[in-house]
Image (spheres, coloured by chain):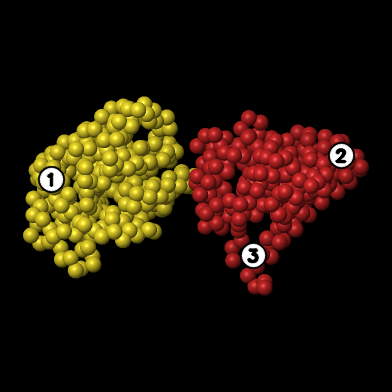
Amino acid sequence: MRSRTLAFIVCSPTGRVGNTILARLLADYFLLSGRSFVGFDTDAHEPGFAARFPDEVVVSDLTTIQGQMGLIDPLLVADGVPKIVDLWHRSFDGFFTLLEHTDFMAEARGQGIEPVLLYLADGSPRSIDAAGRLADRYPDLQIILVGNDGTVPGLESRAQFYHYPQTRTFKIAALDPVLRQTIDERGFSLSRFMMMPPTHMSIVVRAGLREWLWRIFSQFKSFELRMTLEETEHLG
Amino acid sequence: MARNPRPLKQQAPAKSAAQAPSSAPEPELGLNKMKPTLIMVGADKGGVGKTTVARALLDYFASNNVIARAFDTEFPRGTLHRFHPEITEVVDITQTPDQMRILDTLNTSQVKVSVIDTRAGALTTSLEALREVGFLDAARAGDFNFMLFHVLGPSIASLGEIAETTPFVSDAHYFLVKNYINDATFFDWDPTTAQTYFGKARNASEVVIPKLNAMAYEQVDLAGTPWSTFVANRTAAGEPAQHSFTLRGYVRTWQNRNAEEFKRIRLLDFVNGRI
């Protein structure tokens, strides 16, 4: 059985919740495990994700038909290479309208593409409402709720978290400001850091960063394993 | 789908229609229960998308297993012919031989649905021609189904067309088509004027052709194939094509919306003689 091609859509209807860092973490996770990925950045003005991975990520301006084609068409290529979309919050509505107008989900199913929504939760009514609508509209769609303690501290213990559709969750721990500064540096690659930590770096920074990344990557790994198990035919 | 059990008053014995051939179809054969249907798509102005509407109709019939043929009156070179070459004949509706080609074959042809895409500015003359050869009377007598899809333009001139057309089609199924395919800012008619004109077309119902993404429209145009062939990612010759999914998706959604609209007006019931 051929395995499905995963298409991760990192999204949130609100800004500044950590879309780009999540897309980046996912991209580095694949690079670290020796695989490639194809990425898309829909923020045509300040493409932070594309700036990190100039060879793998293309910028798609969804307000133009060319940009729409540049995103949707490659997303439907079932080549086994994971796709990562960093959906800018301003193109959130446009993107889902586009999916609706092109009947994307049906085509994706037909092509053996598995869209996975990584939904960054922030507890705002707008965010809860949009998540609910997506879950209603696409009952078969995998939605993973991501709590980012770095941008929205303690959300998972708050009452409004339970207003989201009941789905699987990922958690990104808050990162110490010093470590944050390190990974924000231009040209700093998370996967390269994991493979070969620079010797000049403080051991405290190295350990802290490794710990933080490890926790996130192991969640990605367990997600992948579960997907593999679900695809296995002879499992009861 | 809702079936209307109303008794069909069109089942009257065949009247002597002007052009009815002697070999009338035998009514007991289930196949021949279908009366020939003539669908005219027209407008008195060019550029309002008649051919688009005709193509949408042909596509809808094809996807519902209704075999149709088409006549393109954009003589000598037809746009509709380019998209549906196998089923389209280019005719000059003002010439008697071509009128015979359309009307005389309505009863004999195996294909029961004929779509005429009338040339720009020729709607009234075409209707006159149909009246003169007795077709409109025959349709009124129930020998044929006749439908008119009148594609409206955005200007007030279009409303004048309605006034001109209504005398011909009081018994036809008359549909006023608002074609939004290329244009979003459309139909800014003065409500009172519009009401006056629409009031004249008592039996008319409205059909809306929704907007289609401009680039998607253009690519189908370049491909020169029926909408569904484009959606199926095939060339006119049936070979696999390389059309963008995004554009195909737009066309497919647009087609589905058209199909809903045609279903709403019970187009299939009409050509199958169920109304």
Q: Where is residue B89 in the image (x, y as percent from the top left)?
A: 20, 47
> Marks 3 and 2, how far apart in space?
38 Å
Of B27 and A83, the residue lying toward us:
B27
> Marks 1 and 2, how far apart in space?
84 Å
- Would you call the spot at circle 2 few (<14 residues within 10 Å), some (14-19), or many (20 or more)? some
Residue appearing at x 37%, y 29% in the figure: B191
Residue appearing at x 12%, y 52% in the figure: B104
Looking at the rendered structure, the secondary structure element under dot 1 is helix
Return the mark for residue A176.
2
The amino acid at mark 3 is Glu
Residue appearing at x 14%, y 50% in the figure: B138
Q: Position of residue B16 (x, y in %)?
A: 8, 54
Looking at the rendered structure, the secondary structure element under dot 2 is loop
Place residue B132 in its image quadrant.
top left
Which chain identifier belongs to the yellow chain?
A: B
The amino acid at mark 1 is Gln
Q: Chain A is drawn in which colour?
A: red
